[in-house]
Image (cartoon, rainbow, N blue to C red):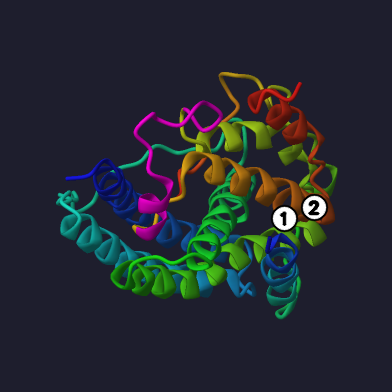
Amino acid sequence: MHFKKLFQVLVLGGAVVGAGAGCSQANAQDKTKKPPVDAGTQTQAGGGVKGW
Amino acid sequence: MTAARRTAAEAWAFRARVEQEAALRFDRLAAVVAGFDPGSPVPAMMRRAAEDERRHTELCARLAGSLGCPVALEPMPEYPPIAPPSLDARQAALYEVVAACCITETESMATLTTLLGGEPDPEVREVLHSISRDEVLHSRMGWAHLSRESSSAEVAFLAPLVPAMLAGTIDEGLFGLPPPEEDPEGLLRLGVLPLAQKREVFLGTLEQVVFPGLERFGVDPEAARQWLAHAAGLS
């Protein structure tokens, strides 16, 4: 199967693209931000995106 | 009409709607990401992706029509936000990018390459090939954004939220039995994976591409692995 190649092309390739410009700027509190207390619960968990 | 042709026509019609929604999503996310990361290459990629998706919508709709399922697309359909309301705007954008690009577009890319590795009908192959060229970029821009965010902000908050992304992306019945009339050869010729192969591609892509990718950028995939094992009946 082609999963190893997909990892290289998509994940590693994406990281290269992302690093190709200046670094992202952090919000002042971002690095110390804690996960929301209700993250992962059924009602607040969010959803996904349908694909092929 | 054969069962395979009917199933394929419905699948291509569904894909047309998926692509249309993706175009709207990428247009919106491009503006959001540019707002907090103006130096990022991702917004430009998203704007291009939105154009790609509009073209894909037409390709998929045309193929669905030629297979016997004409598609009536609404000009501007609405779609609900998918990020948990407890997240701030930047976190919500990251949630949506990971769900739409790192998971869904990566899965789509795996599906496309699997289909192109078979022997689809010439008209189908042409559409698959055209779309696959663009989908590489659509997946990559998600990993690019996650990579950038992981270097400047806390991304670990996503870990317990990935199961909801996965639950929202799979079809009902993915882990069930195929319909008795399923014609695997006929489906593959028309650009649709039979259920067993679809499941194999979905699981392999998560385990060998998505989960290692998340882990690489600081999102612990353990909760997602547990969710998957339960959903697939492995635990």
Distance Cα–Cα, label 2 vs label 1:
6 Å
Q: Which dot marks residue B116?
A: none
Q: Main secondary structure of the magenta part?
A: loop
Query: What residue is at 30 percent from the left and 45 percent from the top?
Result: B4
Residue A18 spot, x, y in % from top left: 70, 72
Q: Is residue B146 above or below residue B72?
A: below
For the C terminus of chain B, the image quarter is top right
**Chain to which the residue tagged by mark 2 belongs:** B
Q: Quadrant of residue B48?
A: bottom left
Quarter of the image with the N terminus of chain B is top left
Q: Position of residue B119 (x, y in %)?
A: 44, 67
- Is there CB contact under 8 Å for labels 2 and 1? yes
Which span is picked out in magenta?
B173-189
Chain letter of the residue carrying label 1: B
The image shows residue B90 at horizontal and vertical percentages of: 62, 50
Res B231 quadrant in image: top right
| In the image, farthest residue toward the bottom | A20
Q: Nearer the viewer, residue B226 or B94?
A: B226
The residue that disc 2 covers is B212
Who is closer to the viewer here, B102 or A31?
B102
Q: Residue at x 49, y 43 (%)?
A: A49
Q: Is residue A50 left or right of residue B79?
A: right
Judging by the rendered image, the residue that carries numbered circle 1 is: B209
| Residue B43 in view here | no
Q: Does dot 2 land on a helix, a strand or a loop?
A: helix
Query: The residue under label 2 is which amino acid type?
Result: Pro
Picture quadrant where residue B233 is located: top right
Relative depth, front residue between B108 and B41? B108
